[in-house]
Image (spheres, rainbow, N blue to C red):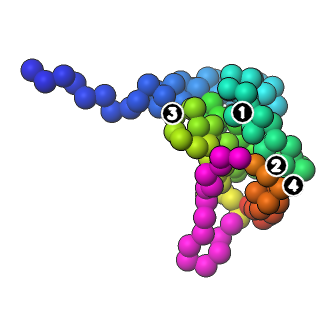
Amino acid sequence: MPAKKQILSPEELEALQDTKRERKKGGKADGLADLHAALAKLPPAEKAMGERLHEIVMAAAPGLAPKTWYGMPAWADTDGKALCFYKPAGKFKERYSTFGFNTNAALDDGNMWVTSFALVKLAAPEEKTLAALVRKAAG
């Protein structure tokens, strides 16, 4: 009998478990503390990038609320839905980190627009671009 094929990777299963924990907290969640706890688990370079992204997001759109989303740092709109998120490379054993936007982000631009960015390093030009996109996304 052939071995049963695993549908989700161990990393994806862990992200689902993170989501279950986040949902159980519901209104009792401390989004900022949860975000900092998620960052604390990361390797130093990814943690530093996440901390810098948090600074950029909060400066660009102070109305967004820090939280975690599938165990990753994220920032929510006034409805509590993750508007943008940081997916560290190590989370799913990828070669680069990602900063992405969900469908509630007001980034619509014609028939096609970018919703996520590969991040290897953050320098002034990338920070400026992300800040402008976060401002636009937050409306």
N-terminal-most mark, 4 or 3: 4
Secondary structure state at the residue bearing disc 3: loop
Q: Which mark is residue 18?
A: none
Nearer the observer: mark 3 or 2; the answer is: 3
Q: CA distance from mark 1 to mark 3?
A: 15 Å
Residue for badge 4: 60
Residue for badge 1: 45
Q: How many marks?
A: 4
Q: CA distance from mark 4 to mark 1?
A: 22 Å
Q: CA distance from mark 4 to mark 3?
A: 29 Å
Q: Which mark is residue 93?
A: 3
Q: CA distance from mark 3 to mark 2?
A: 25 Å
Q: Residue at x 65, y 70 (%)?
A: 108
Q: Are marks 4 and 2 in contact (CB under 8 Å)?
A: yes
Secondary structure state at the residue bearing disc 2: helix
Nearer the observer: mark 4 or 3; the answer is: 3
N-terminal-most mark, 3 or 2: 2
Asked if residue 46 lies in the magenta stretch, the reply is no
Badge 2 amino acid = Val
Quarter location, residue 6 = top left
Q: Residue at x 71, y 64 (%)?
A: 106
Q: Which residues are magenta?
A: 107-121
